[in-house]
Image (cartoon, rainbow, N blue to C red):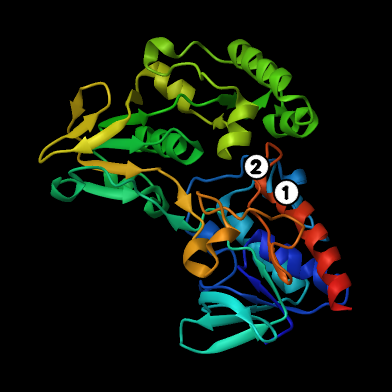
Amino acid sequence: MADVVVLGAGAAGLAVAAQLKARGVEAVVLERGPGVATSWRGRYDRLKLHTVRQLSGLPGFAIPRGYGRWVRRDDLVRYLEAYAQRFKLDVRTGTTVERIKPGAAGWSLRLADGSEESARTVIVATGYLHTPQVPPWPGLETWPGELIHSAAYRNAEPFRGKDVLVVGPGNSGAEIATDLAEGGATTVRLAIRTPPHIVRRTTAGWPAQLNGVLLGWLPERIFNAVAAATARMELPDLRKYGIGRPAVGLKTRLRTGRYVPLQDVGIVRDVVAGRVLPVAAVQGFDTISVLLADGTSVQPDVVVAATGYGTGLRELFEDPSLVDETGVPLVHGGAPARPGLFFIGYDVTLGGMLRQAAIESRRVARTVSRLEK
């Protein structure tokens, strides 16, 4: 095994490996899936990046213009495959690391096949969208309907003619709800616990991502006020349709909950038209119904839980002090969390995850290359 090991062949892992190679440091990239960009391959069919192509490329190789302004899922996978090939990265697929602990030579990695490998430096880039999570709703085990996590959703065809409840008004949940409404589901409901911050993906051709990049430096109080005023100007009042206005400012939610706003790619239109019906948060299940927080209940055929992911890092490391209560590394993005241990790709910003991965890859590569030479 190489002196430097990168875990995860997604955007962040490939970018940091390429940046290390440019500085004369060879790294081995270990990927649990069958190819690079495993998490992207598994997302729903209609997915496009919510960030513009020009600000989503990785260092040293731009995303081709032919992929358009909003890059489709399959094109992004092709781009990441081409990126690994362009820089001749040593990516070893089908290799799952089950445990990492300090070792005599730096770090010891236990693989799923039972073997042990060592590395002087480990860069963890497995991402915060690693392990699908479903809340432990009371009564779920006795409910007779079908439940899937949004990670398993591909398209609306299997749900044609069915009553579907989507839980979670994030970007995935809202876009899946729109996909279902367009794809022939008889009824589509969207369960909402906390009203989302909704932004137009573009306004007069200007992408929301650039607002995040250009205005992100503003003090929290001012940014919150600007974001709220913009939403009131750009969007209809959705309170009469069942979606309240957020009680906490956008930048405050980003700081306290790693939250990104919901980019409107059809959900506002569908809610106003009655094709997607907002309902209260899910409280639990009984033998026939899904119980909601406002005391009502619904009886869907299918529940799609767009309820987020865990990092999987608690299971990967013996040292619980590396991560916070949500499983996110306490130190990440540039500085070492421990000597020879780095985490990259865990920072949520309004500028976009791919842009942030590119920024962090340069930081980490600079630090590691100094240590390795």
**Percent x, y for residue 339?**
74, 70
- Report which residue position mark 2 lands on: 70
**Residue drawn where x is 57% and y is 73% of the image:** 31
**Percent x, y for residue 129?**
52, 53
The secondary element bearing badge 2 is classed as: loop
Q: Amino acid at mark 2?
A: Trp
**Residue drawn where x is 58% and y is 35% of the image:** 256
Can you tell which mark lies on residue 1? none
Separation (CA) of disc 2 from disc 1:
17 Å
Q: Amino acid at mark 1?
A: Gln
**Percent x, y for residue 240?**
39, 10
Seen in the picture, residue 135 relative to 187 is either above or below; the reply is: below
Q: On the rendered structure, is 7 left or right of 242?
A: right
Image depth: mark 2 or mark 1 in front: 1
**Residue drawn where x is 58% and y is 76% of the image:** 101
**Residue drawn where x is 60% and y is 22% of the image:** 249
Q: On the rendered structure, is 156 left or right of 108?
A: left
Task: Count residues near mark 2 (Cα–Cα under 10 Å), then give few for <14, some for 14-19, many for 20+.
Answer: some
Cβ–Cβ under 8 Å for marks 2 and 1: no
Locate the C terminus and report the quarter of the image it occupies.
Answer: bottom right
Q: On the rendered structure, is 176 left or right of 344?
A: left
Seen in the picture, residue 211 relative to 288 is either above or below; the reply is: above
The residue lying furthest to the bottom in this view is 115
Question: Residue 282 or 65: which is nearer the viewer?
Answer: 282
Question: Residue 19 or 202: which is nearer the viewer?
Answer: 19
**Percent x, y for residue 347?**
66, 48
- Residue 79 seen in render: no
The secondary element bearing badge 1 is classed as: helix
- Report which residue position mark 1 lands on: 356
